[in-house]
């Protein structure tokens, strides 16, 4: 029985009894039961849990005594932390082996006469699974071009959760949207929420098509222009085609511009203000209510948007543009 399964998950009554024992004088099981208004059977059941963890012991006079919790709980937590460290090391080994397993898998497909096709059609019902598979098996920047946020898989809750998980892991995501999405308050809120989570965004007057580039893995694009909520998609595996889409994205990114307004921009201005006041990144994260990783990503994105190399230059550029006094 480890600390997480026992101490961390003791039921409310067991915790009440433990605190009662810690605060009171040594007493018998019957005494504790009477003081708490419990039956002896109930008190004995919860005492057995505490005794199994060596948090309490019974003296020769059948008195219940508690050990110093700094010693007992500390000992249990030390054991649990050691087990967690060992488990993390095992998982790290598995993660480091993913690349070799993937290479073996691709070789097996080739030897079996079933190589990965240059492209394949993904029915709308299978798009979320395809996105998750591509996101988890690819490496590098995720690049998205969306003509609207009102259609496609991006608004599905499952995909939203995956995006949040990916960005929380520190992976970079760049997205290009049409300016028209900012005219719709509901979609503007969504875009700003994604920006606050660390997504780097730019906006174009007109976005020609919808596609997502999953790092080094492939390209997912809409099969047609029908304004349906969940369209079928095409998944392109060809490296030459993927390189073409990367070049297209980079050109669209160069033409697009960040949008300095609304909630996301207000948060950026607050970050700039706190930087100017000499606050450390950790303090800024606490003040604006974001994670440390997100704050650092936002600062890096602002430096990129303003075309500067240092934080001092960022402050000067922000002042020149009137974002700061």
Image (cartoon, helix red, strand yellow):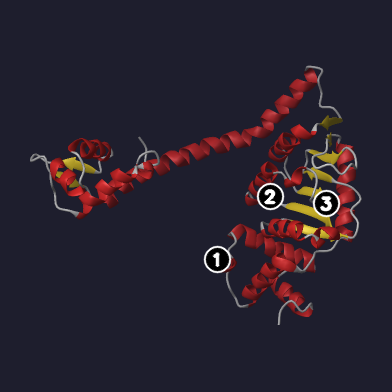
Q: Residue furthest top?
A: 112
Residue pointed to by mark 2: 171
Residue pointed to by mark 1: 286
* Residue 263 percent coordinates (x, y): 70, 66
Alpha carbon of mark 3 to alpha carbon of mark 1: how far? 33 Å
* Residue 15 percent coordinates (x, y): 30, 47
In front: label 3 or label 2: 3
Mark 2 falls on what kind of element? loop
Residue 113's tag is: none
Mark 3 falls on what kind of element? loop
Q: Quadrant of the C terminus?
A: bottom right
**Considering depth in this image, is 229 or 123 the residue closer to the camera?**
229
Q: Is residue 40 left or right of residue 303?
A: left
Q: Is residue 30 left or right of residue 4?
A: left
Query: What is the crowding at mark 2: few (fewer than 14 residues within 10 Å), some, or many (at least 20)?
Result: some
Please report whichever mark, 1 or 2, sits nearer to the chain's N-terminal start: 2
**Can you tell which quarter of the image residue 300 is in?**
bottom right
Q: Residue furthest left?
A: 61
Query: What is the crowding at mark 3: few (fewer than 14 residues within 10 Å), some, or many (at least 20)?
Result: some
Mark 1 falls on what kind of element? helix
Residue 148's tag is: 3
In front: label 1 or label 2: 1
**Considering depth in this image, is 279 or 133 the residue closer to the camera?**
133
**Considering depth in this image, is 304 or 65 the residue closer to the camera?**
65
Q: Quadrant of the N terminus?
A: top left
């Amino acid at each position: 029985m480890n600390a997480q399964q026992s101490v961390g998950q003791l039921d409310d009554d067991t915790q009440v009894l433990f605190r009662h024992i810690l605060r009171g004088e040594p007493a018998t099981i019957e005494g504790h039961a009477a003081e708490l208004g419990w039956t002896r059977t109930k008190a004995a059941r919860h005492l057995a849990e505490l005794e199994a963890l060596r948090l309490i012991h019974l003296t020769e006079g059948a008195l219940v005594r508690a050990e110093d919790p700094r010693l007992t709980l500390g000992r249990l937590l030390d054991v649990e932390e050691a087990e967690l460290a060992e488990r993390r090391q095992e998982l790290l080994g598995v993660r480091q082996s993913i690349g070799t397993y993937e290479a073996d898998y691709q070789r097996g497909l080739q030897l079996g006469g079933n190589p990965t096709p240059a492209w394949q059609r993904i029915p709308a019902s299978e798009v979320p699974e395809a996105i998750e598979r591509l996101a988890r098996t690819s490496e590098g920047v995720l690049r998205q071009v969306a003509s609207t946020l009102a259609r496609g898989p991006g608004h599905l809750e499952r995909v939203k959760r995956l995006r949040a998980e990916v960005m929380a892991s520190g992976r970079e995501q760049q997205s290009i949207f049409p300016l028209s999405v900012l005219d719709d308050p509901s979609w503007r809120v969504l875009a700003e929420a994604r920006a606050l989570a660390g997504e780097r965004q730019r906006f174009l007057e007109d976005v020609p098509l919808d596609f997502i580039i999953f790092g080094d893995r492939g390209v997912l694009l809409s099969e047609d222009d029908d304004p349906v909520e969940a369209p079928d998609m095409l998944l392109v595996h060809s490296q030459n085609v993927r390189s073409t889409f990367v070049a297209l994205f980079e050109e669209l990114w160069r033409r697009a511009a960040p949008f300095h307004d609304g909630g996301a921009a207000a948060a950026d201005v607050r970050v700039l203000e706190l930087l100017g006041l000499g606050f450390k990144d950790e303090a800024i994260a606490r003040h604006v209510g974001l994670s440390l990783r997100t704050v650092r990503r936002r600062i890096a994105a602002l430096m990129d948007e303003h075309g500067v190399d240092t934080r001092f230059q960022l402050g000067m550029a922000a002042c020149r543009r009137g974002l700061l006094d």
